[in-house]
Image (cartoon, grey):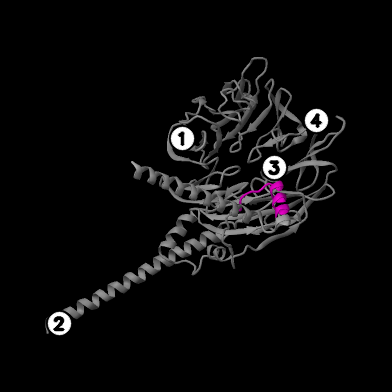
Amino acid sequence: MISTRRRQSTKTQFRLLTSQAKVGFCLSGLSLVIQVMAAKDTAPSLEILARGPEGCFVWNGPPFGNDEPSVKLERVPCSSAKFSEDGSRLLVMKSDFVISIYDCSSFKEIKSFQVPNVLAAVLSPCGTYLQTFQKSSTPQVKNLVLWKTESGESVYQQFQKNMTKTTWPSIRLSSDESIACRMATNEIQFFDPKDFSKGIVHRIRVPGVAAVELSMVPGSHVAAFIPESKGVPASVQIFACGKEMQSQPVARRSFFRCDTVQLKWNRGSTGLLAVAQADVDKTNQSYYGESKLNYLTTNGSHEGLVPLRKEGPIHDVQWSCSGSEFAVVYGFMPASATLFDKKCHPLLELGTGPYNTVRWNPKGKFLCLAGFGNLPGDMAFWDYVDKKKIGTTKAEWSVTSEWSPDGCYFMTATTAPRLQVDNGIKIFHHNGSLYFKKMFDKLYEAEWKPESPDRFGEIAELIKSVDSLKVTETKSQGQGAVSKKTAPVQKPAAYRPPHAKAAAAVQAELFGGSSTEQMSKNAQKNKKKREKQREKKAAEAATTAGDS
C-alpha cells in the first residue's frame, strides 16, 4: 500500500516537472519570437527599384504578403533611375531634360532640376549633391555642374571636354563626403566638400594619369593609374589625401602589357586590388586578352601579384564586408575560386566550375559563385563561417545579381538591351532555394535600395533558430506560389536556319507532307537495303562453309 502511494507521488512529481519544462520551453520560444519581431521592427524594410519602357517603380522587398510585392512608389515615366550610395535619395531622369530627386523615406519628390542637353547625372554618396554633365560645343560653356539637392543652387562649375565610363563621375566623394577630388590633366585636384566655392584647395602632380579611384570608407587615400608610355611601364600609385602627406606615393606597383585597370578598395582603406588587363594575349592562350591581379597595401607591407594556382584570366574579384578577406574567380574554364586574407594567404578553396562571378554577402557569412553571361547560369552558395557549400541552383540568362542589404536574399535579373527576351527577376534564399519569380515583357534594370548592413543585426541567425523550433508561418509565402505558377520547362527545339525552313515549305507544297516524313521514308529504304545486303553476305558465307 505504501509502495503504491510512493509510485503515485513519483508520477505526480514527474508530470509536474514535465509540465514546467514544457512551459519553460514555450516561454523561451516565445521570447525568441519576440526578439525576431523586435529586430524586424527596428530594421529598415527591403525595397526594390525596377525600370521598364514605361518608367521606374519601387516595390516593398521580401518577405511578401499574398505572394506578391506591394508598390511603394507608383510608376514614374523616365529614362533612368538611380539611388544614392546610402539609399537616402533617388535620382530620376525624365523627359525634356528634367531631373527629379525623391526622398526615399517617403518617396516624395523634394526637388526638380531643368538641365538642358544633359547627358549624365549622378548623386553623391549621401545625396547632398547632384552632379550633371551637359553636351557643350565651346570651352566657354561650363558643362560640368555640381548642384545642392536641398536648395537647388549650383556650387561648382567646370568645363569638361568629354565623359567616359572610366572618368565618370568627374568629382569623386568618399562615402562620408569628407573628401572630394577630381582627375585633371597630369594632376589630381582636391576640394573642400563643405565649401566648393573655395575652388581647388590643393593638388597632387601625377604625370600621365588616366584613371583615379578614391577610397570610400574612410576616404584617406586615392589610387592613380598611369598607362605605358614610350617604353615606361604602366603603374598604379597610392597617395594619401592629407595635404601635408602628398609629396610621394605611399605604395607603387609597375607592370608591362597593361591597357586598362580595375581598382577595388577594401573597407578600411588599407588594401587595394588592381586587375591589370591587356587587350592582346601575347601567349595566344586567350582570345579575350591577358589579365593579372595585383595587391597593394597603404602601409607598404605588400606590393605584388596575388599567388593564384591556375593560369588564365581574372573573371571577378570582391572584398568581404569587413575588408579582411577577398574572393577571386580566375583561370581557364572550369574556373577556380579562392578566398585570401589581407596578407594574400589562401584561406579556403571553393573548387572549380563554370563560374565568372562572385558576390559576397553584406553580413560576411555567405557568398555566391555564379556563371553568367555566356555561361549556363550555375550558382553555388557557400557558408564562409562553417566553410561548406549549402546549396546549388541555376539562373539562366542573368545579367545582374546582388545580395539584399540584410544578407538573407539573392536577386538576379535578366534585362534589356543585353537580352531582349525572357526578361524578369528571380529572388533566392541564402541557400539557393527559389523564393520569388516575376517575368516582364521588357525590363531595363532591377536593384535593391542600398542600406547599411549594420542596421539589420544578425536576423538570419534568429530566423534559423525560430525555424528549428517550428515557430514559423504555416506556409512559405514565395516558394509555394512560385511552384504553382511556374510552367514545366520545355526542351528547346533544334535550330533550323531560315533557308532550311523555306526549303521544307517548298518541298511540302510540291510533294505533299512534310520534309521530316520524306526523310523518314528514305531512312526506311536505306535500312531495308542494308538488311538485304547483310542477309546476302550471310548466305554467301554459309554456302562457302558448306562447300569446304
**Residue span colored magenta:** 493-507
Q: Which residue is mark 2?
A: 4
Q: Which residue is mark 4?
A: 161
Q: Earlier in the sequence, mark 3 or mark 2?
A: 2
Q: Earlier in the sequence, mark 2 or mark 4?
A: 2
Q: Residue furthest front?
A: 547
Instruction: Decide whether residue 500 is among the magenta residues.
Output: yes
Q: Are marks 3 and 2 in contact (CB under 8 Å)?
A: no
Q: Are marks 3 and 1 in contact (CB under 8 Å)?
A: no
Structural distance between the alpha carbons of marks 2 and 4: 101 Å
Q: How many residues crowd around disc 2 within 10 Å: few (fewer than 14), some, or many (20 or more)?
A: few
State which mark lies toward you, 3 or 4. 4
Q: Is residue 214 left or right of residue 38?
A: right
Q: Earlier in the sequence, mark 3 or mark 4?
A: 3
Q: Secondary structure at mark 2?
A: helix
Q: Is residue 233 left or right of residue 464?
A: right
Structural distance between the alpha carbons of marks 3 and 4: 22 Å
Q: Amino acid at mark 3?
A: Ser
Q: Which residue is mark 1?
A: 341
Structural distance between the alpha carbons of marks 1 and 2: 69 Å
